[in-house]
Amino acid sequence: MMANSLVQGTVNFRDTGGLPVGDSLTRHGVLFRSGNLATVTPEGETDLASLGLKRIIDLRDDEEVNRQPSRAGDIPISRVPLFVGSVASFFTESLGLTEMYRTLIDDSSDRVVDVVRGVLADQPVLVHCTVGKDRTGVTVALTLAAAGVDESAIIADYARTEGLLPAERNRAVIELVRKVHPDSESIVELATKSPAHIMQGLLADLSTRFGSPTDYLRANGLSDDEIAGLREVLIDRGTRTML
């Protein structure tokens, strides 16, 4: 049985509502994140429809989409393939998540901004990749950062993924990748982990190089008006966190 909280037949599907933004909280029912939608059940399609999604942003490449096409009913899907080059190279060269994320934000910066703009364009919106861990983890983290979400909450939301991946899925993926890349030292980390210190390091790196994660998005074309709009749609100013 696949782990799932909102949509039957999915892994790592969740709402980003309820995260602290100073004295406020992010809105529920606006921005969702998940793994792929290839194994959504008929009941799951009903679950998806009930969320009122206006857009799905799929971060996978053509090969992934052709191998595991989405089952999302009539919900519009926007494709924003996020990696330039092959993910397999990270296994071949035994590179870890830090290197993967640095490559993603440096080589796919225009597409990262496209994802953020997609969140701003239509809500409710779902952002997903294959597992909802890395490409989704990075783009959702940067979207939340631009909205002003507390850094500790962004890190915790990223790290939460690791506990939502089914053990049987992890075992199967590790076994499969080891057959192809038997000498790789990074399989377990790349395939199954989302440790808090990795996201903390990414956000720190963006702050060092650009001033802040939001300034990274600005440097790659996101306007102040778009950032203000993002905060308007994602933050519920009427809420207050518990003291």
Image (spheres, grey):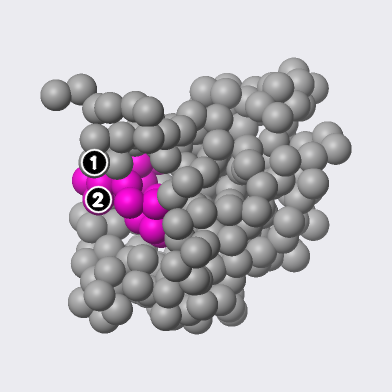
Q: Is residue 158 magenta?
A: yes
Residue kind at label 1, given as amino acid type = Gly
Label 2 crowd bin: few (<14), some (14–19), many (20+), radius 10 Å: some
Say if residue 127 shows up in the picture.
yes
Task: Indicate the position of residue 38 as horizontal and vertical percent values.
Answer: 72, 41
Task: Determine which residue is flagged by label 1.
Answer: 22
124 versus 110 height, above or below:
above
Sequence-first tag of 1 and 2: 1
**Which of the pair 72/118 is nearer the observer?**
118
Q: Which of pointers 1 and 2 indicates the residue nearer the eye? A: 1
Dot 1: element = loop
Task: Determine which residue is flagged by label 2.
Answer: 151
Count of number-bearing discs: 2
Q: Are marks 1 and 2 in contact (CB under 8 Å)?
A: no
Q: Residue furthest top?
A: 43
**Which of the pair 108/224 is nearer the observer?**
224
Residue at image position (42%, 74%) is: 218
Task: Quote the CA–CA distance across marks 1 and 2.
Answer: 10 Å
Q: Is residue 117 magenta?
A: no
**Secondary structure of the magenta portion, mostly?**
helix
Task: Indicate the position of residue 34 as horizontal and vertical percent values.
Answer: 55, 41
| Quarter of the figure that contains the N terminus | top right
Residue at image position (37%, 28%) is: 238
Residue at image position (45%, 60%) is: 227
Task: Indicate the position of residue 45 as horizontal and vertical percent values.
Answer: 76, 26
167 versus 158 height, above or below:
above
Residue kind at label 2, given as amino acid type = Glu
Q: Which residues are magenta?
A: 141-161
**Which of the pair 124/127 is nearer the observer?**
124
